[in-house]
Structure formats: C-alpha cells, structure tokens
C-alpha cells in the first residue's frame, strides 16, 4: 500500500457540524418523521477555482479553517482561509459589513511581506462592493520562494476600502466616498498549513517501511502543566493525523509518559510519520522527544522544526 492511495483526513463540513452537535451517531429526524438530509460537503477552495485569474494554480493541496482577524463585536468582521497550493498560498479574506449606512467599495487586504523570506505578495483580487449585512471575499496571492526554507511566517494585515455613505432604507448613495484603512490582527502561516492529515492502517509497519535514512530526532522542553494540553499542542504544531488512538491521553495513565503516533503527507508529496514521547517533568513543564521520518531528510527537518 502506498501513501498516495490513503485517504486525506481533514475536517469536512459534515464533521464540523457533527462536532457542534456532539458525537452521537443517531440519525436526525425531521418534524414529519423523515430523516434530515445529510450536510452538503463543499470544497472550501471552490471559490478560488471560480476565479479565472487563478486557474493556472491548479488544484489546492488543502485549505485551512477560517481564522478570525477581528474581534466579534467590531464594525467590520474579517476572517481568513488559507488555500495551499504547490508554489502559492491564496488568502481568502471574508469581509462582513455591519454598518447599515455604509457600503464598502474596492475592498482589499494589504499583506505586509517585508519580514518574510519565504513568501512574496504577488497579487490582489479586490471585492467590488460589500453592502450592509453582506459577507464578500477578496484575495491576496502569496508566492513561495524556492530558495528559502519553509518556516512559519507572520504578516501584518490591513483592510483597505472606500467608504460610501448610503441611505439605510433605500441603499442610495448620500455623498462622495472616502478612503479608509482598518488594521487587522496579524496572520500566521505555519508549517502545519502545508501538511495534510492522512490515516495509515498499520502505523508500526509503515514506520518500519519508511526506515530511518531520512529520520530527524529532536528533544524539546515545553511549558505545559497538563499532559492533555501538551498532546493537543503537539498535534496542532505538527498538523498531522493521530494514529492508533494515541491522540488522547488515557484517564488511568497518571503521570506516565505518553507516546503519540502521527502521520501525514507534506505539500511536496512526501509521506511523513512521527513518533513523539511526551513526559511531564516536575511541576512546570513537559519534555518532548520526537522522531520524524520521511523519504527526504530535508522534509523531516522542516516538520520537526514545527515544534516551538
């Protein structure tokens, strides 16, 4: 069996809905006693595929969940979905206008790439209008620098638009527009964004098959007071799929070291496996010993460096 034939395990719309409602496998039944229709699963990158200017990028490797870039009570609500391609990252900014006497025109998000050696902002696609109550999308395209190693990058972001005053009842314009800038929260692109979760039927066999030629070993001291928190954080740092039921700490484990098995596929196509031993040390920290294997030691190094 090869990794290319294994399923991608990402949070689908149906799984997110189930997570909100609980883990019950009961079938939802409507008022007439008939089963409720299943949640339609929509590819989050479909909005990118619909843009002719981005057709040359091909298919997305994966898409992140939306990341909020504003507080929930602000006048403009902005989230960002990161669409990962082989050589590009398309940032989809979803902008909601909550002010009833304003229309936002020519909406873009300026992404400051001056501090990043890995990414260069190479283009923008503006949103023409965002009326009151609407949520519309604009896009920024980041191009990866092949000569720079893939590493976490943090970007300062700023919402830019033209404010047009309108009559709340009719929507008609009431005066000339003016340029406006609105600071957003910083956006991070992590190495884990370039990893797809992949389940393997037999982790031990897969581990032995990959071998240790491209293995990287590391040891880290992490500031966590609870084993559960440390395990969750390591899974998030790596962006990989827990295997063999190791994603949760058993209640009877006490303070014994926990072994975590992870698998995934990197954006460049290499399968990646990781074994992590997480042990409590004293009252204020955790020691993490991790081994990462792939066919490419450089990929193993990038993945091991996810821990921070």
Image (cartoon, rainbow, N blue to C red):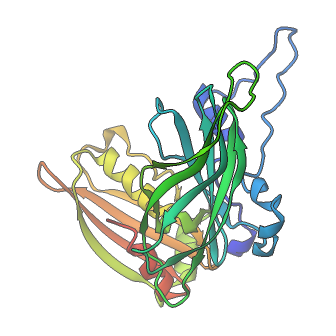
Q: Which quadrant would the C terminus be assigned to in this image?
A: bottom left
Left or right side of 51 for 84? left
13 and 199: which is toward the camera? 13
The image quadrant where one finds the N terminus is: bottom right
What residue sits 71% from the left and 38% below the top? 14
In this rendering, the answer to whether 250 lies above or below 300 is above
Q: Position of residue 132 (x, y in %)?
A: 66, 30
Residue 38 appearing in the image: yes
**Residue 293 at x, y percent in the picture:** 48, 79
| Extreme-top residue of the structure | 31
What residue do we see at 46% from left, 70% from top? 274
> Which residue ends up furthest to the left in the rendered image?
282
Along the viewing direction, whichever of 272 and 236 lies nearer the viewer? 236
In the displayed structure, does residue 34 sit left or right of residue 103? Answer: right
Between 47 and 36, the one lying in front of the other is 47
Q: Is residue 78 left or right of residue 226?
A: right
Q: Nearer the viewer, residue 272 or 130?
A: 130
Determine the residue located farthest toward the front in the rendered image. 175
Q: How many marks?
A: 0
- Residue 171: image quadrant is top right
- Looking at the picture, does residue 61 appear above or below residue 120? above
Question: Can residue 12 be seen by looking at this rendering?
Answer: no
* 11 to 139, vertically: above or below: above
| Relative image position of residue 143 (x, y in whole percent) | 60, 77
């Amino acid at each position: 069996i090869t990794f290319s034939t294994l399923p991608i395990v990402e949070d689908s719309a149906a799984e997110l809905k189930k997570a909100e409602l609980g883990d019950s496998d009961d079938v939802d039944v409507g008022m007439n006693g008939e089963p409720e229709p299943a949640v339609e699963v929509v590819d989050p990158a479909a909005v990118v595929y619909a843009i002719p200017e981005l057709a040359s990028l091909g298919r997305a490797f994966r898409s992140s969940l939306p990341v909020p870039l504003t507080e929930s009570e602000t006048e403009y609500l902005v989230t960002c979905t990161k669409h990962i391609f082989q050589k590009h990252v398309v940032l989809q900014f979803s902008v909601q206008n909550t002010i009833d006497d304003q229309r936002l025109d020519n909406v873009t998000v300026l992404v400051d790439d001056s501090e990043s050696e890995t990414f260069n902002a190479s283009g923008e696609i503006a949103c023409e209008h965002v009326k009151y109550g609407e949520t519309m999308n604009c896009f920024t395209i980041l191009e990866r620098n092949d000569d720079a190693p893939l590493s976490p990058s943090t970007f300062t972001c700023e919402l830019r638009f033209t404010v047009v005053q309108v009559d709340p009842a009719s929507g008609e314009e009431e005066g000339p527009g003016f340029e406006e800038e609105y600071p957003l929260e910083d956006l991070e692109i992590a190495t884990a964004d370039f990893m797809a979760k992949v389940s393997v039927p037999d982790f031990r066999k897969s581990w032995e098959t990959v071998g240790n030629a491209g293995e990287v070993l590391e040891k880290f001291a992490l500031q966590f007071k609870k084993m559960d928190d440390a395990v969750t954080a390591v899974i998030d740092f790596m962006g990989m799929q827990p295997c063999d039921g190791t994603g949760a700490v058993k209640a009877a484990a006490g303070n014994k070291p926990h072994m975590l098995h992870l698998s995934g596929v990197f954006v460049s196509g290499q399968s990646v496996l990781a074994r992590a031993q997480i042990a409590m040390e004293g009252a204020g920290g955790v020691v993490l010993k991790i081994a990462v294997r792939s066919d490419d030691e450089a990929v193993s190094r990038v993945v091991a460096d996810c821990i921070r």
